Image (tube, rainbow, N blue to C red):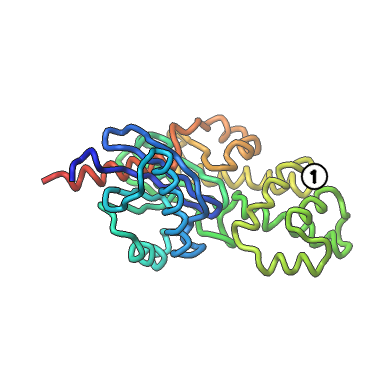
Amino acid sequence: MEPAQHFLIGVDGGGTGSRVVLADLHGTELAQAVGGASGLGLGIERAWQAIEAACAEAFAQAGAALDWSRCTLGCGLAGVNNRDWLAAFLAGAPKLAGLVVESDAYTTLVGAHGGAPGVIVAVGTGSIAAVLEPGGAWRVAGGYGFPSGDEASGAWLGLRAVVHAQQALDGRARVDAFAQALLARAGASDRDSLVVWLCNANQTAYASLAPIVLEHSAHPVAAALLAQAGSDIAKLIDALDPAGTLPVALCGGLAQPLSAFVPPASRARLRAPQSDSAHGALQLARQAFERRRQP
């Protein structure tokens, strides 16, 4: 195989969607694509299907056909901290030239600070925080998963916000604009239809309610949730960098809207990430390819 025939792919996979970056061995970015959710908690087969579809789309944009045997794939995925899910994902892999799989927290960390020491708090469908220390070690805080963890995430916000809609339906709260918007997003018009939605709702479904919380940020219930989200982000930062010496990047789909609710002392430390999780995963793919080339 000629090196020029080889491709590097970075994948960022979460509970709402996947993002793919395709590059050649010279580091030239060829295409980007998005696809369905590939967080491992939603199913291993579904994860691989979403990754393959997004990769095929990226290759199509680049004017080439997807051939796994010519690809080194770097993945940053939600759910790899569950060793059983990770083992199943690796067992289900196609015949790739190379594969490296890490937590999406790690690839977000690598992308955000270019591989240099720093802290990230990633808030999207789920949430997790991580630090890369000056000595090269890394560790995480939070990220225990839905529904008990993932503070400040979209699913965390939605799970708590829907309680207001429940209370409005049976008279414990007013049927106000916030409650009506939550019910409309859930496609529910009464108690029975909301119960059906709740019984079927997963992490992604609850996260779909998060934009409603942000749109009604002046509502007392929404305001309290957003204030708690900001406080929880600050706690994650403090847990990973108590000395307050490292740069901090707030990352993920909810980073921009939630930054306003982070307490001032922590908000002053926030820096824009250099790149995203998919590009961090691409760096891992490049490193994995280089290791294979070494004698």
Residue at (70% x, 66% y) in the render: 198
All told, the count of numbered labels is: 1
Q: Percent from the top left, x then y, of residue 98? A: 27, 52
Relative horizontal placement of residue 76, taking residue 71 as reference (left or right): right
Considering the numbered disc 1 on the image, is that residue within a helix, a strand or a loop? loop
Q: Residue furthest left?
A: 295
Asked if residue 233 shows in the view, the reply is yes
Q: Picture coordinates of residue 64 (x, y %)?
A: 35, 42
Percent x, y of residue 39: 48, 57
Residue 105 shows in this picture: no
Q: Is residue 108 above or below residue 85?
A: above
What residue is at 79 percent from the left and 50 percent from the top?
181
Which residue is found at the position 48% from the left and 36% from the top? 248
Q: Is residue 185 above or below residue 3?
A: below
Q: x%, y% of residue 118?
A: 41, 37
Q: Mark 1 packing: few (<14 Cα in 10 Å), some, or many (20+)? A: some
Q: Say left or right for 279 vs 1.
A: right
The residue to which callout 1 is attached is 219
- Image quarter of residue 2: top left
Mark 1 belongs to which amino acid? His
Residue 58 falls in image quadrant: top left
